Image: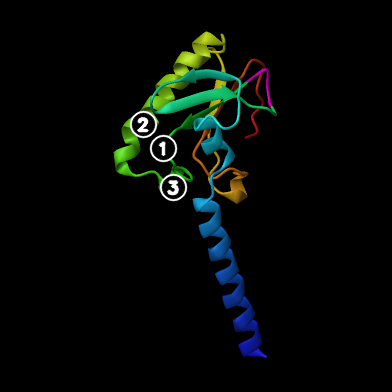
Amino acid sequence: MCGIIIGKVVARHAILAYYDTRVRFMKNIFQKIIDGEIPCDKVFENERIIAFRDIYPAAPVHILIVPKKAIPDIMHAAKEDAPLLAEVVFVAQELAKKFHIEQGFRLLTNNGPEAGQSIFHLHFHLIGGKTLGREA
């Protein structure tokens, strides 16, 4: 009985590891947007970052700010990514001014499925244009 349970646990971890590997190497929707394969409502772009309106906005202003470098999530960012992450903040500031939300907005990222991350390419949500509640 114990061998069967251990076998199921090992098999489950092997399946999850296989799935995790496939997800990381498949081209996700953000990479397709970056590559110009899928259109978006772009509001900013430079050599390192693209920003566009979220298709399922949580507020009147809901912009996704996406580094073009393929980083799965914030936990996979390396020390050498610090300038890129700082640039994301400056892009968020610029966009907050452009969309007149500089007096109140949220800039957030989800890390992992338990936090609600569904696309495993690091991205940040710039949310504003209404009074935001205390909840995450």
3 or 1: tag closer to the N-terminus: 1
Query: Which quadrant of the view contains residue 80?
Result: top left
Q: What predominant SS class does the magenta segment belong to? A: loop
The kind of residue on which mark 2 rests is Leu
Disc 3 versus disc 1: nearer the observer: 1
Residue 121 image point, x, y percent: 51, 41
Q: Earlier in the sequence, mark 1 or mark 2?
A: 1
Look at 39% across and 28% down and name the residue there: 48
Residue located beneath label 2 in the image: 84
Q: Quadrant of the N terminus?
A: bottom right
Please say if the residues under marks 1 and 2 sit with CB atoms less than 8 Å apart.
Answer: yes
Residue 123 spot, x, y in % from top left? 51, 35
Cα–Cα span, label 3 and label 2: 14 Å
Q: Is residue 93 magenta?
A: no
Identify which residue, 25 or 67, lies in the foreground.
Answer: 25
Q: Determine which residue is flagged by label 3.
A: 75
Q: Give, as a three-letter code, the residue at label 1.
A: Lys
Q: Secondary structure at mark 1?
A: loop
Q: Helix, strand, or loop for circle 3? A: helix
Q: CA distance from mark 3 to mark 1?
A: 14 Å
The residue at which mark 1 appears reads as: 69
Query: Which residue occupies 36% across, 31% down?
Result: 84
